[in-house]
């Protein structure tokens, strides 16, 4: 009888230790799972932030290029207006110099956009 009682006691003790260990492991597992969820949320936030920064940079570059092309086209239009009025004033050499300069501006702009 004493041996049976001792065996039951040892069995209960082992079951208690196993249950305690199992609960501890489950608790650690839950903590790690929550850490993974937080890390995933942080990764998603950082990805969204990166995407937003890339879109902002693309818009800034597009505006810069657009403004530069607009400035060049305005300069070309102004130069063509001057070239159109120059022959009337007898300034043909200036017209050719202006046209060469305008052609160079067009070539540079095409090289930038190509």
Image (cartoon, grey):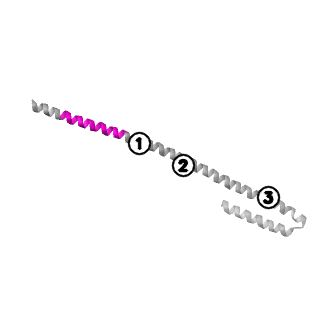
Q: Nearer the viewer, residue 86 or 49?
A: 49
Dot 1 crowding, Cα within 10 Å, few <14, some 14–19, many 20+: few
Q: Quadrant of residue 84?
A: bottom right
Going from the N terminus, do you reach mark 2 or mark 1 first? 1
Instruction: Give how far apart the Cα atoms at labels 2 and 3 are.
Output: 40 Å
Q: Residue at x 12, y 31 (%)?
A: 4
Disc 2 secondary structure class: helix
Residue picked out by circle 1: 35
The residue indicated by pointer 3 is 77
Q: Is residue 110 left or right of residue 45?
A: right
Residue 64, horizontal then vertical, whole percent: 67, 54
Which residue bears the numbered disc 2? 50
* SS class, disc 3: helix
Give the magenta range. Answer: 11-30
What is the quadrant of residue 103 in the picture? bottom right
Q: Earlier in the sequence, mark 2 or mark 3?
A: 2
Question: What x and y, as percent, mark residue 109?
Answer: 70, 61
Point 84% across, 70% down: residue: 93
The foreground one among 84 and 28 is 28
Query: Taken as a whole, is the magenta stretch helix, strand or loop?
Result: helix
């Amino acid at each position: 009888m004493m041996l049976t009682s001792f065996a039951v006691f040892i069995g209960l003790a082992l079951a208690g230790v196993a249950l305690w260990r199992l609960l501890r492991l489950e608790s650690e597992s839950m903590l790690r799972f929550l850490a993974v969820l937080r890390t995933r949320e942080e990764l998603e936030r950082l990805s969204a932030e990166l995407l937003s920064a890339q879109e902002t940079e693309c818009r800034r570059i597009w505006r810069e290029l657009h403004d530069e092309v607009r400035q060049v086209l305005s300069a070309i239009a102004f130069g063509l207006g001057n070239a159109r009025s120059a022959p009337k004033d007898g300034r043909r050499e200036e017209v050719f110099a202006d046209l060469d300069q305008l052609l160079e501006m067009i070539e540079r702009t095409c090289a930038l956009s190509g």
